[in-house]
Image: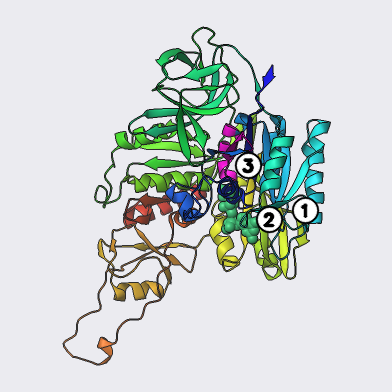
Amino acid sequence: MNYRSDIRNIAIIAHVDHGKTTLVDAMLKQSKIFRDNQEVGELLMDQNDLEREKGITIMAKNTAVVYRGVKINIIDTPGHADFSGEVERVISMADGCLLLVDSVEGPMPQTEVVLRQALEKGLKPIVVINKIDRENSRTAEVLRLIQDLFLKLATSADQLDFQVLYTCATEGIAVCEPGAIGKDITPLFEHILEKIPPPQVESGPLQMLVSNLDYDSHKGRIAIGRIWRGKVAAHDPVVSLSAGGSVTHYEIGAVFTYLGLKRLEVAEAEAGDIVAVTGLEKVNIGDTIASPERPEALPRIEVGEPTVEMTFGVNTSPFAGREGRFSTARQLRERLYKELETNVSLRVQDTDSPDTFLVKGRGELHLAILIETMRREGYEFEVSKPEAITKVVDGKLMEPVEALTLDIKDEYIGVLTEILGKRQAQLTGMRKDGPGNMRLEFHVPTKGLIGFRSAFVTATRGEGVMNSTFLGYEARQGDIVSTRSGALVASEHGIAVAYGLSNAQGRGLTLIEPGTPVYEGMIVGLNSRLQDIPINVCKEKKKTNVHSSTSDIAIRLTPPVKLSLEQAIDFEVDDELVEVTPENIRLRKKLLAEAQRSRNISRARRSMKA
Ligand SMILES: Nc1nc2c(ncn2[C@@H]2O[C@H](COP(=O)(O)OP(=O)(O)OP(=O)(O)O)[C@@H](O)[C@H]2O)c(=O)[nH]1
Ligand SMILES: [Mg+2]
């Protein structure tokens, strides 16, 4: 075995929002990849539209900088628990990791999840306590908590001997001692060179593990991964070794390595480096690209199981086909199955109905991002309420459970513990977090978290922060009784008007504005009671011949509550659907006709009596 002292491969891991992508910015900016006066902006690696809008990283990505003649390949990963499949997918490209921890928040549940993965893979960690500029920063205590976490998770004694750095990623500053004055990010680069082992390499015929895929309209499919043995050059004959054991012959098109935000075309690349290659039309994530001389597969990437499922179906609303470019079952099915090529923790299944597909993901946000992406591409379809995925182990029905942390003002403790109690959550920890602030920790079944986010936002008036992380499977407890209020359901087809909506507002909240086209069975508001009620929002005020002054008084409506896609998915209950089109997100009853719905209710009552 040899080492490549000219390369280091590191993954940046942390809980959501602890500053990973900002730290990558700092490394890119200091490494003089940009011209001195070039405006480059922030969160440079979060290039996808949804990442920019939501301010979170969704997909893991590669970049590289050169420091003192050593190329540091950097893998930025998402911190949100729903995208932890991305971390599992890319972490094996690295030899070391930077574990970032916010100097106020300290280690969070997802910090533990990603650190466990990194240590199990044998990565050498460097701890980076970030956001040291924050007012309530408590670095000493945070470091102690990190040490506890390492004691719990380390798989070998030398993992306990980790370097700690303190950073302000937004300012591009790193220091080795808390309180020291720094001027740039140099100490971080120095420690990466010193502490992270250079890649071990083997000479011999090529072996490369595909960890990511990309597309280019000219170059076609691009396979990204680390070379473990040998080298690769343009026009080399290679084979790809797939999951089923099949072997496909290809010729490499071009070879690229990373530098800053670009890929550089190179003549060849050698073991230890992370590269992108073209020419392999059907290669998949997890496949090994090898020399035909010695076609030996590397261990495939293992990714955790999905925990939440929902159906994606052909749009069956009366407005179907009006707003989307792609709306047939065939188009929907093709798009969903294509997603599987890159979205590694997603699963798609056909169902008994040719118009409906079961889609499984790692959480509500994971599925919501897919829905939003498809809607922007021009698809229209309908989705059901997400449900936790149960499984049978040794004859026992099991369900996923999660660790939930809430950061809230202490006045909300009572109402939240009450809401969560009904959702089968158990309080596992509670501590003061600065004056008037509390951190609460719960153990809760995933099914109890579905629909909880909107209740949380309402209960805390949008001031709280919630985070949840998958823990594992446990014996399933009973059902949770839905506590959502009934829906105000449009009883007629037409255009909603102010008069009709003001009647609806007498019953509860409305979700639409005057002028909105509606159909029978569409949900236009939320009742203040538990039952659904039909309401005619298209009804105009009766015209009278007598011109009275009162009839001319404009109707004053409270502005409607507009639900985002994620809120709509969180809001819907079992007998409802969300209709998603490029232009609109509508909520509807599964059964549109009022007569049909009431027949169903009386049938259910009769069968309960029987
Ligand atoms: N005060 C302060 N804020 C910071 C610092 N580093 C990052 N932030 C802010 O923290 C927020 C989250 O930063 P990101 O870099 O997007 O965090 P991330 O870890 O990449 O988040 P995900 O990829 O979504 O998990 C942004 O608003 C940053 O400006 C820091 O050192 N100090
Ligand atoms: Mg990020």
**Which numbered disc, 2 or 1, marks the residue closer to the eye?**
2
Total labels drawn? 3
Q: Which residue corresponds to mark 1? A: 142
**Which numbered disc, 3 or 1, marks the residue closer to the eye?**
3
Residue 336 in the image, given as x and y percentages of width and height: 40, 35
CA distance for labels 3 and 2: 22 Å
Residue 161 in the image, given as x and y percentages of width and height: 82, 38
Local packing at callout 2 (Cα closer than 10 Å; few below 14, some 14-19, many 20+) is few
First to last magenta residue range: 68-90
**Which numbered disc, 3 or 2, marks the residue closer to the eye?**
2
Q: Secondary structure at mark 3?
A: strand
Q: CB atoms at circles 3 and 1 under 8 Å apart?
A: no
Task: Name the N-terminal-most of marks 2 and 1.
Answer: 1
The image's colour scheme reads rainbow
In the rendered structure, the answer to whether residue 572 lies left or right of residue 126 reads left
Which amino acid lies under the numbered mark 1 shown in the image of this protein?
Val
- Give the image quarter of residue 332: top left
Q: Which residue corresponds to mark 3? A: 12
In the rendered structure, the answer to whether residue 583 lies left or right of residue 204 reads left
State the residue in front, 257 or 604. 257
Which amino acid lies under the numbered mark 3 shown in the image of this protein?
Ile
Task: Name the N-terminal-most of marks 3 and 1.
Answer: 3
| Magenta run includes residue 77 | yes
Residue drawn 40% across and 45% down? 373
State the residue in front, 524 or 109. 109
Q: Secondary structure at mark 1?
A: helix
| Magenta run includes residue 598 | no
